[in-house]
């Protein structure tokens, strides 16, 4: 049994009403998400996800996409302060990128791992402090859900049915109970929710 420091494992993801985290066009199809991601509720929610996190876990696709976007926001004095706060946190925090193809870390304060998510999380929980945030990366969230290793889910639900694309909650997950600890709805019908695992 690995000694645990009590670090929480958290994850954030945005979903359509039909439970998709991308549209029918594939991993980069976010047409159904675009109208909502800069809403007040979405920005406040994004601020919430990182305030107690000290480690970010990212899949390769997200890591590369985020690298192309967030460092510039961190430097942009005209950016929304919430966006800038998240961007600065992401640039400065410890990052673990899951990849079978990368040979070197794409960012500073980043290490690349090619290992099962559950094993990496167990190692991280044994050292350090602060939350371990799986940052919008369903490829990591899914195996952690399967292993019942997530303690908190930050979900944004957007009022659209994508009709295709990948779903977060696959059949065959272990049954689990969650408690709603925060919710906020926006003018566009988007809802931010925080669920904590009841153990």
Image (cartoon, rainbow, N blue to C red):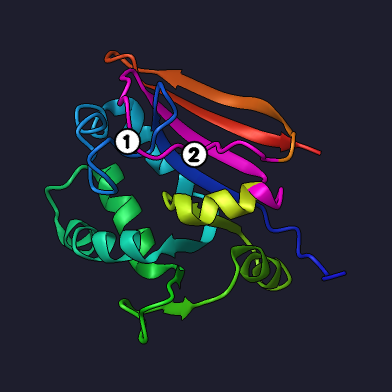
Residue that appears at 62% across and 41% down: 152
User: What residue would you read off at disc 1?
Assistant: 43
Is 148 rendered above or below residue 67?
above
Q: Which segment is the magenta one?
A: 146-173
In the displayed structure, does residue 166 sit left or right of residue 75? right
Q: Which SS class for mark 2?
A: loop
Q: Circle 2 is placed at which residue position?
A: 168
Note whether 113 is above or below 180 in the view shown.
Answer: below
- Residue at 32% across / 35% down in the picture? 43
* Camera-side residue of 103 and 121: 103
Quarter where residue 107 is shown: bottom left
Characterize the magenta stretch by its predominant secondary structure: loop
183 is higher (above) or lower (below) than 117: above
> On the picture, is 10 further left or further right than 196?
left
Q: Is residue 24 left or right of residue 20?
A: left
Quarter holding the N terminus is bottom right
Q: Number of marks in the image? A: 2
Q: Residue at point 33% right, 59% down?
A: 62
């Amino acid at each position: 049994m690995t000694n645990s420091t009590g670090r929480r494992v958290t994850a954030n993801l945005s979903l359509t009403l039909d439970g998709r985290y991308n549209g029918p066009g594939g991993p980069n199809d976010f047409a159904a998400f675009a109208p909502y991601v800069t809403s007040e509720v979405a920005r406040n929610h994004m601020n919430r996800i990182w305030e107690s996190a000290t480690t970010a876990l990212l899949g390769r696709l997200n890591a590369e996409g985020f690298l192309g976007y967030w460092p510039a926001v961190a430097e942009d004095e005209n950016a929304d302060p919430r966006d800038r706060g998240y961007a600065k946190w992401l640039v400065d925090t410890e990052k673990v990128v899951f990849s079978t193809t990368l040979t070197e870390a794409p960012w500073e304060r980043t290490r690349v791992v090619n290992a099962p998510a559950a094993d990496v999380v167990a190692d991280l929980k044994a050292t350090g402090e602060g939350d371990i945030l799986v940052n919008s990366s369903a490829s990591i969230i899914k195996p952690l859900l399967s292993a019942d290793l997530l303690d908190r889910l930050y979900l944004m639900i957007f009022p659209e049915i994508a009709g295709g694309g990948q779903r977060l909650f696959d059949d065959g997950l272990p049954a689990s109970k969650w408690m709603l600890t925060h919710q906020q709805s926006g003018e566009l019908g988007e809802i931010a929710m925080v669920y904590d695992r009841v153990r």
